[in-house]
Image (cartoon, rainbow, N blue to C red):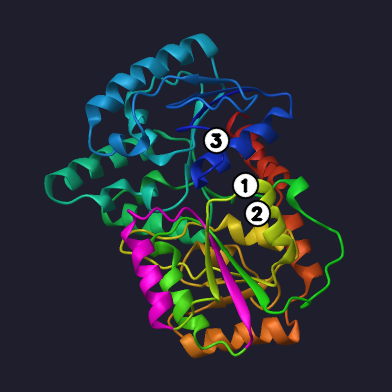
Amino acid sequence: MKILYISHHLKGNDGWSRYARDLIAETEKNGTEVLCLVNELDPETNILQKALLKKEPLAYIINPIISFFDAQKVNSVIDEFQPDIIHFIVEPYATMVPFIKKGKAKIVITAHSTFAYLPILLTGFKRKFAEQVTLSYYKKVDSVISVSKYTEDHLKKHMGAIGGLKYLEGKLNIVSGGVASESIDDSPRKPLSNSPREILFVGALKPRKGVIEALEVLSQVKTDFVYRIVGSHDPKNPYVGLIREKIKSLGLEGKVVLTGSISDSELKSLYEKADLFLMLSMNNGADFEGFGLVYIEANGRGVPVIGSRDSGVADAILSGKTGYLVDQHDVVGVAGLIDDVLQKNTIKAEDCLAWARENRSDVKAKKVFEIYSNLLK
């Protein structure tokens, strides 16, 4: 089998590229011949890649000219490479699909989050035009892989509103991303040995990640703790300023640490000593958490997690088993659950690890490969 992947890059430092890198790496283990077309080369990967895409993904949402001309370049690669599967991993690049001459190849799109339905980001004439483009490419694709039921429901709802639900019939599958086997740490953990307790956040500092809401909750927690927020805290980012103001207004100085970006080894160390992972993702307008692989990463170190239920996170957490799904606005209730985890060890490390093993990247890639194989029958 020959597979042509289309992603922005393979650096693994965001959701799209992490999904692409891990899926392609596992797919190659099946002896599959792969090629990934990207906007930016990653010099650190051994995956065969070609810098062919002219722009970063968001440029394709409102500019059909870019989509058309890049599709011609992709068509040249298709003629030369002769893929069996063409997999668009980054949704905005799917605007090229109406112009793709796929031949006998089957086209697959992964729907991660908001960008699964691009018109939601636009208004007026641009939205109307985007709706027609969206109908066109979902009609042409052969399979749509959503990373969560929430994302699939989001896509079905909006496609239904423009009469496009018929183009999804028989094409829908749900397969999330997964964590690498080597990131799962089976070594015994000494529960609740930290004083103060260690609570961890890892992610981009933006409203959708719910850091402000987490701080509100933590102000009501009775257990002594330190909350380490891992992520770039660019002083030009207004949300970082709001976080700092909230820390001060709630009197959490000394309890909250903005680490900034850190190395993989430093992050590994923080996971190893964490007692809880806390990220209360928000639906920020049209922007929502499609899945939340970071919760599985924490579970892979035996760390309990707490996340918000009204999002794709619902597929990432077994509530009461690997952590808790909560209403992020229920400050007192969430604070009580945090105290339970930190004082009573209500979530067991072995349950977290078992869930992480079920969500390994090789397990997920096998399911995607089965989708490819079924398309080619």
The first of marks 1 and 3 along the sequence is 3
> Compared with residue 144, is residue 359 higher up or lower down, i.e. above or below?
below
Q: How many other residues sit within 10 Å of disc 3, few (<14), some (14-19) or many (≥20)?
A: some
Along the viewing direction, whichever of 162 and 178 lies nearer the viewer: 178
Q: Residue at x 54, y 27 (%)?
A: 42
Query: From what the image shows, is residue 248 above or below residue 290?
Result: below
Q: Quadrant of the N terminus?
A: top right
x and y, in percent, of residue 63 in the image: 23, 32
Residue that mark 3 sits on = 11
**Residue at mark 2:** 267
Location of residue 367 by image quarter: top right
The span from disc 2 to disc 3 (Cα, nearest Å) is: 17 Å
User: SS of the residue at dot 1?
Assistant: loop
| The one of 53 and 176 positioned closer to us in this rendering | 53
Estimate the x, y position of residue 108 in percent, counting from the top left: 50, 35
**Can residue 171 be seen?**
no
Task: Measure the alpha-carbon separation of dots 2 and 1.
Answer: 6 Å
Instruction: Please state which amino acid type lies under the numbered disc 2.
Output: Leu
- Write down the residue under mark 1: 263
> Marks 1 and 2: in contact by CB < 8 Å?
yes
Q: How many marks?
A: 3
Residue interval drawn in magenta: 223-250
Q: Are marks 2 and 3 in contact (CB under 8 Å)?
A: no
Mark-to-mark CA distance, 1 and 3: 14 Å
Residue situated furthest front in the rendering: 254
The tag earlier along the polypeptide, 2 or 3, is: 3
**Residue 18 in sight from this viewpoint:** yes
Residue at image position (13%, 50%) is: 124
Category of crowding for the residue at label 2, using alpha-carbon neighbours closer than 10 angstroms: few (below 14), some (14–19), many (at least 20): few
The nearer-to-camera label among 1 and 3 is 1
User: How far across and how far down the image is residue 283, in percent?
Assistant: 38, 66
